[in-house]
Image (cartoon, rainbow, N blue to C red):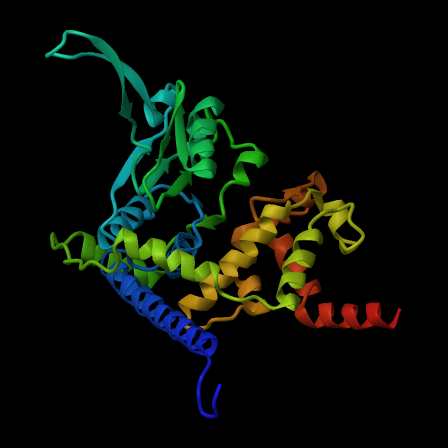
């Protein structure tokens, strides 16, 4: 190759980097536009909106915990409208059966031949965005049918397997104050949700805006931000965000610190946690960190990105002891204590000490 010529490999790498840069700019622009459109309808809840979008671009599902009337359904339906995605809502009740949500085979007559055959009738699971309202009010068998679809992204009926539409995103809600007649999700099923988001009451100023907007009779117009195909492409971009080794180590150590019988766990963990987070928590910390970074226009993940999503990833994956509950220590408070103890600076000191040994 003569002087001044550029190798084909270098040209290919340059083009790939340019495509990645364009994708980052496109995702950051779409994120800003989506926030603006959602803000026309949903007042406040900025943290919940932010983490919902992080989960969506990470291919994760969310569990929203909050009292009725905090616009959870409105938020989900608004996201579906601005993304040109299909949206369905299932009100979970004690008599709901698995076939009611997945669909079932129905015997039908062919008017031309007179023959009978089974045809699969799709249930409400076959949508892009599904709101599973009050998921803890339905029996475990129906919960399991939904959670299996969330994990496998398909539905099996008889001998046939049917692929769910893509993208597929589940938002399930729980009411934290009414527990009579409910079937709480076991920890193994809770682990299928990427985030557990706490939907809190609005501030005084936000509540005043809610009263004015919702009683005016005016509905703000919304414009489309992304299509389903664009979302799938952007989900692929998020997966390609590079992560440095020290960020992987920090996510791993943060998760292992929640397990009371691990040597890495701080001394205060054993009396406060009876069961810690599993490996899936670490995966979601990394994926959430990737999506958070790229939504902010960065193509690299920092330990701050991991810390920012730690509460939503970990709060439903740790089981506190009776001692913790008697002392009024919630899972969120225990996570606060962990983040105060397990810091990037702490990890660096531990790494240096390990090298000296």
Q: Residue at x 58, y 35 (%)?
A: 188
Q: Is residue 301 left or right of residue 218?
A: right
Give the quarter of the figure containing the C terminus.
bottom right
Relative depth, front residue between 51 and 122: 122
| Image coordinates for residue 78, horizontal then vertical, percent | 25, 51
Count of marks, rendered view: 0
Corner quadrant of residue 233:
bottom left
Q: Is residue 9 left or right of residue 345?
A: left
User: Which residue is most to the front?
Assistant: 1
Relative depth, front residue between 35 and 158: 158
For residue 96, say whether it is visible: no
User: Which residue is most to the bottom?
Assistant: 3
Relative depth, front residue between 50 and 354: 354
| Image coordinates for residue 342, horizontal then vertical, percent | 69, 63
Q: Residue at x 34, y 39 (%)?
A: 131
Q: Is residue 268 above or below residue 116?
A: below
Q: Residue at x 19, y 52 (%)?
A: 214
Q: Is residue 111 above or below residue 5?
A: above
Q: Is residue 199 above or below residue 251?
A: above
For residue 54, say whether it is visible: yes
Relative depth, front residue between 114 and 277: 114
Corner quadrant of residue 20:
bottom left
| Image coordinates for residue 155, horizontal then vertical, percent | 39, 29
| Image coordinates for residue 179, horizontal then vertical, percent | 48, 31
Q: Residue at x 50, y 58 (%)?
A: 288
Q: Is residue 241 left or right of residue 169?
A: right
Corner quadrant of residue 108:
top left
Q: Is residue 31 left or right of residue 137?
A: left
């Amino acid at each position: 190759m003569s002087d001044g010529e550029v190798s084909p490999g270098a040209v290919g790498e340059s083009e790939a980097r340019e495509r990645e840069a364009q994708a980052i700019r496109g995702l950051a622009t779409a994120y800003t536009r989506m926030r603006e459109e959602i803000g026309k309808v949903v007042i406040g809840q900025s943290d919940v909106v932010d983490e919902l979008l992080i989960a969506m671009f990470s291919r994760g599902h969310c569990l929203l915990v909050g009292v009725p009337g905090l616009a959870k359904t409105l938020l989900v339906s608004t996201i579906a409208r601005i993304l040109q995605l299909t949206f369905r809502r299932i009100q979970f009740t004690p008599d709901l059966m698995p076939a009611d949500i997945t669909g079932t085979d129905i015997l039908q007559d062919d008017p031309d031949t007179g023959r009978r055959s089974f045809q699969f009738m799709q249930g409400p699971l076959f949508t892009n965005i599904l709101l599973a309202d009050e998921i803890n009010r339905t029996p475990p068998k129906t919960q399991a049918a939904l959670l299996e679809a969330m994990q496998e992204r398909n539905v099996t009926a008889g001998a046939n397997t049917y692929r769910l539409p893509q993208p597929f995103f589940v938002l399930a809600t729980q009411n934290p104050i009414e527990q009579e007649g409910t079937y709480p999700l076991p920890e193994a099923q809770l682990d299928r949700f990427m985030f557990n988001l706490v939907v809190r009451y609005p501030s005084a100023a936000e509540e005043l805006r809610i009263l004015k907007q919702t009683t005016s009779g005016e509905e703000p117009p919304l414009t489309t931000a992304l299509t389903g195909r664009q979302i799938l492409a952007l989900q692929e971009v998020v997966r390609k965000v590079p992560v440095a080794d020290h960020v992987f180590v920090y996510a791993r150590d943060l998760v292992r610190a929640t397990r009371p019988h691990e040597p890495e766990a701080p001394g205060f963990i054993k009396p406060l946690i009876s069961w810690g987070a599993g490996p899936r928590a670490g995966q979601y910390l990394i994926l959430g960190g990737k999506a958070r970074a790229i939504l902010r226009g960065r193509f690299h993940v920092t330990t701050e990105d991991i810390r920012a999503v730690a509460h939503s990833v970990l709060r439903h994956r740790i089981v506190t002891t009776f001692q913790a509950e008697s002392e009024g220590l919630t899972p969120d408070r225990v996570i606060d204590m962990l983040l105060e103890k397990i810091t990037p600076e702490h990890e660096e000191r531990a790494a240096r000490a390990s090298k000296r040994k």
